[in-house]
Image: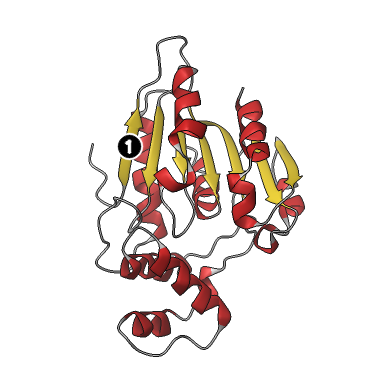
Amino acid sequence: MTHPLLSIDRHVGRDVAERDPVVLLHGFGSSGRADWPHDEWVDPFVAAGRDVFAVDLPGHGSAPPTGGPVALSAVLDELADLVRSAGRHAVIVGYSLGARLAWGLAARADVPVSRLALGGLSPVEPFAAVDVPAARAALAGGPEPADELSRMILRMARSSDGDPASLIDLVDGFAADPFDSSSSAPTVPVLLIAGEEDPMATGGEALVQRLEGGVFRTLPGDHRGVLRSAAFRHAVMEFLG
């Protein structure tokens, strides 16, 4: 099965047990390899007998350029196909943008998900406030956007190892379908982790109240620091068993 918007790096688990596969979803401006280093994430899951699917989202990492705005529904459709093709109920580990996608994916009744471990999830939609035309103009050599959020998103796009124009395409497409945690929520067990110094993840306590089996934890650190911490990794591994 092809996934034209995504790049998927699959690692086959060692034959020590029949365990649910793991899907790893990275944050905006990053990649599967950057957010989920092999020695810290992929190798331990493989050693525990889990197949691992490390995804590069549209325009990120080794995923192809987008060529225009990317609809959220199209990305979720491809991720749903990936999970269904894995052969068992999957556990999904997502951070920031990846956590948002995991939330929406698990809320679909036809997608076999067993557990979610989510970090850095914002309860509001940041992309809707980005000045996309100004960001595109700046990439073409024009002036920088006037507002700080748009400048920040542009900096992340430029510093990524993907295609900056494609990342702005993704922002453009996702902004048209803002994240709304109240419209649907996963019914599987969910671990939510937020950094104590991460303003982007403020409001996680309210998110967990919408879940039937939700656990909320805070860890020291800011948005990037939590992802890089051993405490985050240990919390996720413990939750997933």
Element type where label 1 sits in the image:
strand
When the figure is inspected, residue 202 is found, relative to residue 136, above or below; the finding is: above
Picture residue at 44% right of the left edge, 34% below the top: 38
- Residue 9 image position (x, y, % from top left): 33, 37
Task: In this rendered view, identify the residue nearer to me: 118 or 112.
Answer: 118
Picture residue at 44% right of the left edge, 64% below the top: 174
Q: Quadrant of residue 241?
A: top right
Are there few (<14), some (14-19), or many (20+) residues within 10 Å of tag 1?
Answer: some
Q: Is residue 141 visible?
A: yes
Would residue 218 appear left or right of 135 to someone viewing this image? right
Which part of the image, by quadrant, shows the N terminus?
A: top left
- Residue 67 image position (x, y, % from top left): 24, 67
Task: In this rendered view, identify the residue nearer to me: 85 or 160.
Answer: 160
Q: Which residue is mark 1?
A: 9
- Residue 170 image position (x, y, % from top left): 38, 64
Q: How many marks?
A: 1
When the figure is inspected, residue 179 is found, relative to residue 9, above or below; the finding is: below
Q: How is the image coloured?
A: secondary structure
Q: Quadrant of residue 147?
A: bottom right
Q: Quadrant of residue 73?
A: bottom left
- Residue 80 image position (x, y, % from top left): 39, 41
When the figure is inspected, residue 130 is found, relative to residue 97, above or below; the finding is: below
Q: Is residue 112 visible?
A: no
| Three-letter residue code for mark 1 | Asp
Picture residue at 45% right of the left edge, 17% below the top: 49
Would residue 152 appear left or right of 235 to someone viewing this image? left
Residue positioned most to the top? 16
